[in-house]
């Protein structure tokens, strides 16, 4: 796939490179076979020159054997003669095949063959005369000079054939040189094409790289801009959340004061009035006494409910008794109300009033959530200082949940997180199915 992408990006370069490679292959193969053919021809030319030399030498060897035999009469001198005849026959046969279809060398070879046959016939005749005892006649035939004239003619014809072969050798060498030169020029041109393709590819690659760098720079600028926007929006959202939380706490405080001052006063006044009426009706009207007792009980329940509502809206224990006592009371009331065993390990910590309220609300929200969803039987609440920081955690043994899957409703946790981040802290939630849940918050202690 990567190769296809490169080809699509550089079609011209790929076409040039492919054309150059194919052309180089064709030139290389053509030059190779042309050179091989020329070298084979040069080898045949060298063989032909050797055969021509062997013809001339064969005649000379035959004459040498003849003279030795005539002078000494010893038959061993006939062995070079017979060997020379065989060599001449083989050479003539080879040259016949070589010059078949070639007019000039074939004609020269024909003349040379006739002369050699005549010369060899004379040599054979002298040997025959000597064997018949006509030695003087044989010597006279040798001394007649007929063989010398024919031998000179044979040499001339051999020289012409050698010249013909020399010309062919020169042509073959010239052909090899031309083939090498064509190959050299072709390789040089194809190398230039390859270099041009490489240059185009590198230029295109440099353009792509520049374009990619520009795109990366633009993407980086956009990413930085988005990061700034995200940070700005996050800060604004955090400030807004803090403002809303502060406004809500202020509204809760106002409602708590109104309930305490006005509703509490009204309920207390009603309770006192009911007590006075009950005292005046003492011993009379039993039914009215019973109704007044029920009314007093109802007023007492209303006053207790008002106090609980006021405490939920603005925990007075937090302001009056401190964070540790407020959490202990919250845990005890939750254990009584939910029927869950709560274990507390609470140590004093140094926090601002706002941070103490955040911790209290976080623990309140955590136990409210686990009462709704966790199905826990035990809860552990821990509060302790850790390295100039404060850590509070709420852990349960409930059903837990998968933190990687998106929750159906995350506003409670999201609200906790924004509360904690507004106080420059960190919130962590650790849970898994069947393993319970741990909500942990870390806040910097006040100096």
Image (spheres, rainbow, N blue to C red):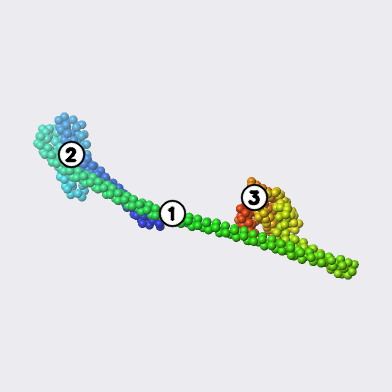
Mark toward the start of the polypeptide (1 vs 2): 2
Looking at the rendered structure, the secondary structure element under dot 1 is helix
Looking at the rendered structure, the secondary structure element under dot 2 is helix
The answer to whether any part of residue 294 appears in the image is no
Which dot, 2 or 3, sits closer to the camera? 3
The quadrant of the rendering that contains the N terminus is bottom left
Name the foreground residue: 325 vs 45: 325
Looking at the rendered structure, the secondary structure element under dot 3 is loop
The CA span between labels 1 and 3 is 48 Å
Please name the residue shown 55% across and 56% down the image: 231
Residue 446 is marked as 3
Left-right relation of 55 to 433: left
Residue 56 is marked as 2
| Residue identifier under label 1 | 213
* x and y percentages locating residue 94 in the rendered image: 23, 44
Mark 3 Cα-neighbour bin, 10 Å: few <14, some 14–19, many ≥20: few
Please tell me in which quadrant of the rendered image residue 358 appears: bottom right
Please tell me in which quadrant of the rendered image residue 53 appears: top left
Mark toward the start of the polypeptide (2 vs 3): 2
Left-right relation of 2 to 169: right
Residue 58 is marked as none
Mark toward the start of the polypeptide (1 vs 3): 1
The CA span between labels 1 and 2 is 83 Å
* x and y percentages locating residue 89 in the rendered image: 21, 41
């Amino acid at each position: 796939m990567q190769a296809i992408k490169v080809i699509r990006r550089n079609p011209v370069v790929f076409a040039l490179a492919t054309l150059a490679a194919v052309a180089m292959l064709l030139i290389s193969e053509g030059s190779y076979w042309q050179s091989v053919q020329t070298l084979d021809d040069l080898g045949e030319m060298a063989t032909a020159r050797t055969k021509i030399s062997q013809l001339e030498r064969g005649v000379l060897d035959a004459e040498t054997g003849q003279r030795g035999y005539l002078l000494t009469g010893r038959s061993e001198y006939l062995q070079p003669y017979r060997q020379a005849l065989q060599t001449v026959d083989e050479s003539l046969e080879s040259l016949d095949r070589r010059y078949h279809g070639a007019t000039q060398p074939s004609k020269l070879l024909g003349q040379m063959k006739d002369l050699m046959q005549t010369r060899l016939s004379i040599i054979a005749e002298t040997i025959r005369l000597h064997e018949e005892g006509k030695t003087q006649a044989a010597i006279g035939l040798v001394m007649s000079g007929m063989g010398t004239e024919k031998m000179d003619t044979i040499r001339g014809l051999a020289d012409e054939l050698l010249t013909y072969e020399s010309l062919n050798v020169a042509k073959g060498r010239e052909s090899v040189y031309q083939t090498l030169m064509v190959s050299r020029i072709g390789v040089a041109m194809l190398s230039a094409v390859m270099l041009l393709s490489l240059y185009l590819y590198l230029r295109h690659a440099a353009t792509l790289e520049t374009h990619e760098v520009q795109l990366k720079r633009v993407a980086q600028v956009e990413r930085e801009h988005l990061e700034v926007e995200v940070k700005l929006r996050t800060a604004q959202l955090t400030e807004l959340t803090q403002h809303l939380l502060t406004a809500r706490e202020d509204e809760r405080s106002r409602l708590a004061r109104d309930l305490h001052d006005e509703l509490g006063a009204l309920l207390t006044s009603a309770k006192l009035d009911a007590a006075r009426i009950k005292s005046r009706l003492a011993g009379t009207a039993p039914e009215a006494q019973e109704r007044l007792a029920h009314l007093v009980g109802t007023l007492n329940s209303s006053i207790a409910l008002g106090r609980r509502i006021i405490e939920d809206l603005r925990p007075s224990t937090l302001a009056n008794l401190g964070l540790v006592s407020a959490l202990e009371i919250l845990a005890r009331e939750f254990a009584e109300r939910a029927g869950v065993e709560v274990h507390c390990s609470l140590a004093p910590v140094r926090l601002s009033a706002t941070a103490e309220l955040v911790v209290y609300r976080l623990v309140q929200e955590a136990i409210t959530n686990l009462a709704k969803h966790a199905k826990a039987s035990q809860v552990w609440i821990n509060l302790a200082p850790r390295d100039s920081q404060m850590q509070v955690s709420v852990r349960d043994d409930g059903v837990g949940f998968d933190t990687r899957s998106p929750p159906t409703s995350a506003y409670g946790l999201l609200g906790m997180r924004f509360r904690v981040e507004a106080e420059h802290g960190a919130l962590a939630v650790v849970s898994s199915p069947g393993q319970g849940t741990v909500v942990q918050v870390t806040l910097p202690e006040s100096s």
